[in-house]
Amino acid sequence: MWKQLFVKTERGKFEVFVKGNGPPLCVTHLYSQFNNSGDYFADVFTKNYTVYLVNLKEAGNTDSVNSPHEFFMIETVFDLESIREKMKIRKWVFAGHSTGGMLACVYGIHASNSLKGLIIVGAAAREYASSSPACIYHVDHPQHELMQQLIERLKDPDLEQNERKKISEERTKLSLYRPELYKILFSKPIHKKMAAARMNFFAREILQFNVTKQLTAITIPTLIACGRYDVQCPLSYSEEMASMIPNANLVVFEESNHYPFLEEECLFELSIQEFLLK
């Protein structure tokens, strides 16, 4: 289990879960609510790093926002920086999957001096749904409507737990290279929810999100990882990021969709170790 901490900063009180030993590494996601059961993505790093898994504002037991603008990614970067400074961590690695990877781009652009490295997995540096029919959020994708229906149902705070688990499983299977392996890949007793307010804001912010021209400002080593068949953030977006970030290395996982850290766990861990040990 992960150890729960509360970090009080000038920007609010944040719930942080800690696990592992070694240099500091931070993980978060724009609209996930974490708890002491942890997170599949964050777990990857606990073998060699002290991992700080952060609940952002309006998620878990972290403070609420005072104004909607606090949901913006740039404000979230300032929140993470306030946590790092309060914990007296000089620099840490930031790792983000999916929307966490989008946040990683913003973090690297505006605060490379606070980071030892970036790990961006299955993400994009700009709005991704409307420009690629390979994306499951594109209206022309054959599974677009099903994905939207499942997401809307998961936003219901009163959804019965067993029903939430069932819907979450259906949603996740849409993003697996081999859906039939779901119960094997997601066998740990890890459970989390969505922060509806954060997700609703992200659905608006993403419409104008495009930091591609600023990626050259990222001055730290960056690992970009993506499954060949990623339906959420198709590979072309990772290729785009890798071509624009000066010190980026792209690793493509040939038998993965959106979860290469589970679908090709050994290869993913090897790629992470090679990157972090450089």
Image (tube, rainbow, N blue to C red):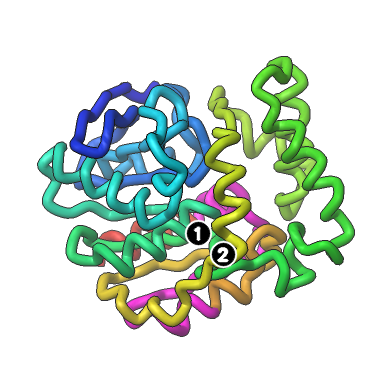
Task: Tell me if 58 is positioned left or right of 195 in this view.
Answer: left
Marked residue nearer the N-terminal end (2 or 1): 1
Residue 153, disc: none
Residue at x 17% of width, y 54% of height: 91
Question: In the rendered structure, are the residues bearing label 2 and label 1 in contact, judged by CB atoms less than 8 Å apart?
Answer: yes
Front one among 155 and 132: 155
The three-letter code of the residue at mark 1 reads Val
Residue stretch rendered in magenta on the structure: 240-267
Quadrant housing residue 47: top left
Q: At which x and y percent is residue 120?
A: 45, 61
Quadrant housing residue 105: bottom left
Q: CA distance from mark 2 to mark 1?
A: 6 Å
Residue at x 85% of width, y 46% of height: 146
Residue 226, disc: 2
Q: Residues within 10 Å of mark 1 (few under 14, many from 20)?
A: many
For mark 2, give the secondary structure.
strand
Residue 155 appears anywhere in the view: yes
Task: Tell me if 87 is positioned left or right of 206 in this view.
Answer: left
Name the residue that disc number 1 marks. 121
User: Is 254 within the magenta?
Assistant: yes
Front one among 28 and 76: 76
